[in-house]
Amino acid sequence: MDESTQISRRATLAKLGGLLAGAVAVGGLKTADSSSATEEEASGAGPAGVESGAVTCVLAPEQTEGPYYLDDASVRRNVTEGKAGVPLVLRLSVVSASTCKPIKGAAVEIWHCDAGGVYSGTSVQGTQDERFLRGVQRTDAKGLALFRTIYPGWYQGRTVHIHVMVHLGGNVVHTGQLYFPDAVTDAVYKRGPYASRPNRDPRNGSDSIYRNGGKRSTLKLVKSGSGYVGSIAMGVMRS
């Protein structure tokens, strides 16, 4: 059962700080099978490849937090709150940009608009008392945080995106945005409730924020039933 505990950015840093400060990177590129590990190291992959510089991880692009961040997100996996839309499961991994190893215990926070382009928690859109499509999850031993949400809608001036923030060791170590391939979005937007708002603008290539690192922040999407599973690994610096 998902937690419904309310945490704020301050609470994330204060209450989770001790937990996250003690988190260690676990796993890595080496497989459990010793022969496979030997083959990886012989070919310059695995931990030896990282150490030698043959394999490197990429620091996730920093992007603007945007105007709709709130510091009272719930710790929960399902953030839909009954909002209509194409189902989307997010598999967000946090890894060390210096070692490529997954990081356990990071707090991953997401927020995005609904199918109509509306954010929760803003008086501008009359949703100040609502908290749909917002949530926090901690990464497991494989560095993975899971969310159940819906495919975001669009609003004038921005391409389709999800905001993301990663807290680690008492600090915000990454603030970014996650994007979607235009071709997939085109297919999704032919379905309801998105189809009632045609002619989205802009697309990825015309979005000023996407142009600064958006390609490396684009989710890998796989069809799953009536929806999609979106995955990405975010490389962060531990301090």
Image (tube, rainbow, N blue to C red):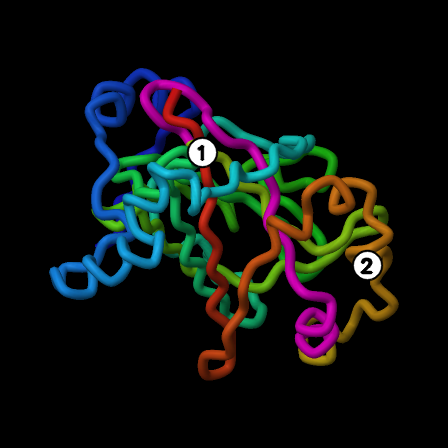
Q: Provide the residue designation for mark 1.
A: 236
Residue type, label 2:
Arg
Label 2 packing within 10 angstroms: few (<14), some (14-19), many (20+): some
| Residue 58 percent across, percent down from the top left | 51, 41
* Residue at figure coordinates x 79%, y 48% from the top left: 158
The magenta stretch spans residue 183: yes
- Seen in the picture, residue 76 relative to 167 is either above or below; the reply is below
* Residue at figure coordinates x 39%, y 41% from the top left: 136
The N terminus is located in which quarter?
bottom left
Q: Provide the residue designation for mark 2.
A: 203
- Seen in the picture, residue 169 relative to 65 is either above or below; the reply is above
| Residue 92 percent across, percent down from the top left | 42, 51
Residue type, label 1:
Val
Q: Nearer the viewer, residue 180 or 152?
A: 180
Q: Secondary structure at mark 1?
A: strand
| Part of the protein shown in magenta | 167-189
Q: Nearer the viewer, residue 184 or 95?
A: 95
The C terminus is located in which quarter?
top left
The magenta stretch spans residue 19: no
